[in-house]
Image (cartoon, grey):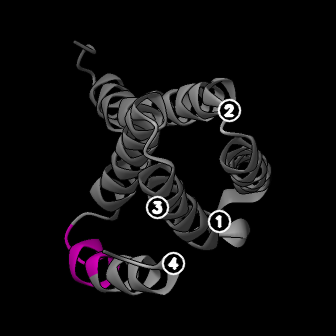
Amino acid sequence: MYGKRGFLDQYRQTSSAAAEHDPHRVIAMLLAGAIERIRLARRNLERGDIAGKAQAIGAAMSIVDGLRLSLDHEAGGEIAAGLESLYDYASLRLVEANAHNDDGRLREVEGLLGEIESAWAAIPRQMGAAAAHGAGGTAP
């Protein structure tokens, strides 16, 4: 379907078009996409579809690489550095999961990306609450 290059090209096109409208949503979509590819890899591994597992892991790795490349270290400082370390770790664990057909490592990365996804999803709510609080309102 897509090779690593195809996913990076797709990411660039999607992020260019969508980032003008909502860069936060683009990152959320990429995180969700990586998690879905890992779930697909797990299902394929369970069925014994090793080629499908490898393809899904490769797709997840491409998305994680795109997330890592999208980090703004100047604006993000320590948070961007921390995310880069997490993305590097996730990529390493995905390589290991692929090489060893290890569902445990896939579950680990799925959980890690899920935590990042949850934190990312909370940002707009936190910003809205801070704006409401700063404007004399109360947070929901």
Give whichever of discs 2 and 4 has the lower sequence position.
4
Q: Residue at x 40, y 84 (%)?
A: 6
Q: Amino acid at mark 1?
A: Ala
Q: Which residue does the numbered mark 3 point to in the structure image?
A: 55
Quarter of the rendering occupied by the C terminus: top left
Give the number of the disc on residue 66.
Answer: none
Element type at marker 1? Answer: helix
Q: Residues within 10 Å of mark 2 (few under 14, many from 20)?
A: some
Q: Which residue does the numbered mark 2 point to in the structure image?
A: 102
Q: Is residue 125 magenta?
A: no
Q: CA distance from mark 3 to mark 2?
A: 15 Å
Q: Is residue 18 magenta?
A: yes
Q: Going by the image, does 120 lie left or right of 136?
A: right
Q: Residue at x 36, y 77 (%)?
A: 2
Q: CA distance from mark 1 to mark 4?
A: 28 Å
Q: Position of residue 129 (x, y in %)?
A: 32, 25
Name the dominant secondary structure of the magenta segment.
Answer: helix
The magenta segment: 14-21
Question: Circles 2 and 1: CB distance less than 8 Å?
Answer: no
Give the number of the disc on residue 75.
Answer: 1
Q: In front: mark 4 or mark 3?
A: 3
Q: Amino acid at mark 3?
A: Gln
Q: Tell me if residue 118 comes above or below residue 138 in the rendering.
A: below
Element type at marker 3? Answer: helix
Q: Amino acid at mark 2?
A: Asp
